[in-house]
Image (spheres, rainbow, N blue to C red):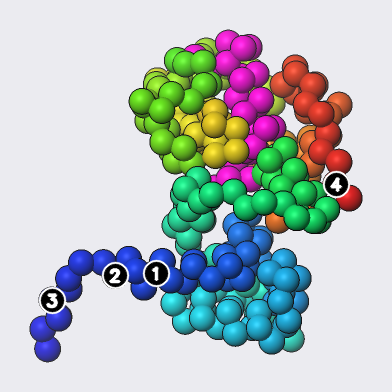
Amino acid sequence: MAEPIRGEPDIAAVAALFADARRARVLLALADGRALPAGRLAQEAGVAASTASNHLGILLDHGLVTVLKQGRHRYYRLATPQVEKVLEALAGLAPRKPITSLREHTRARAVRSGRTCHHHLAGQAGVRLFADLLASGWIEGGDGEHDPALDRLSAPGRGNQYRLTTAGAGALAAHGIAERLLSTTRPVRYCVDWTEQAHHLAGPLGRAITDRLFDLGAISRGTVPRSVVIDDDRFSKLFRRRIPAIHQS
């Protein structure tokens, strides 16, 4: 039997999956790449366990999440990196809701102070890290500032042609970054940070540096999904500038 002729993508059908605030919170809780149990996701979404299970079933049926079974436990994670990209894009377009509780204030502050974005460092910590790499002469080709004429917020940057310098390649190699990632001819990828409206490092190099920071204990997972906590002393020894530690309650 011949394949049926396909028409335009049904964007509205997919968009509807993100339109429920509770499902959106579940997806955001998974956006740092971790697999979490339904109970934890229910807490993040602020709903009963049964309600969270219903939403997870919808997300499973439509291929936005997958489930890992370990013994009697089930852990959920985003099905593809594209789901995280959609969440970041929507976050850049969405209006900011008023903060009405201490818990919301703490979460918003943590996410802005430092978080992971497609597995690289973002928020204030990510922007400052990129600024340090530029100030140190390890990366060149721009000033780290967002220019609306060149790039969109919360999107991969294309307007600047950043490149790793010879000095930067040597310094990062000494910090344990794989040499295959330290090309001085390929453009360095970056994103336009949606909270800071400035550039942070992205791509394979951004992920490798973020992984190395985790390995060295310079950053660690926060209690708020996707947030990271900065160890000021360890971070400053690596990248010269002192970044205030993130204090979470």
Q: Earlier in the sequence, mark 2 or mark 3?
A: 3
Where on the picture, by quarter, is residue 67? bottom right
Q: Amino acid at mark 2?
A: Asp
Residue located beneath label 4 in the image: 248
Expressed as whole percent of the image width and height from the top left, the position of residue 163 reads 45, 20
Q: Which residues are magenta?
A: 116-140
Residue under circle 3? 5
- Nearer to us of marks 2 and 3 is 2
* Of pointers 4 and 2, the one earlier in the residue sequence: 2
Mark 4 or mark 1, earlier in chain:
1
Whether residue 236 is visible to the viewer of this picture, yes or no, is yes
Which residue: 60% across, 38% down? 195
Q: In percent of the image, x 50 and y 45: which residue is there?
A: 92
Q: Is residue 86 magenta?
A: no
Mark seen at residue 14: 1
Tell me which amino acid carries mark 3: Ile
Which one is nearer the viewer's eye here, 145 or 176?
A: 145
Is residue 137 magenta-colored? yes
31 relative to 175, above or below = below
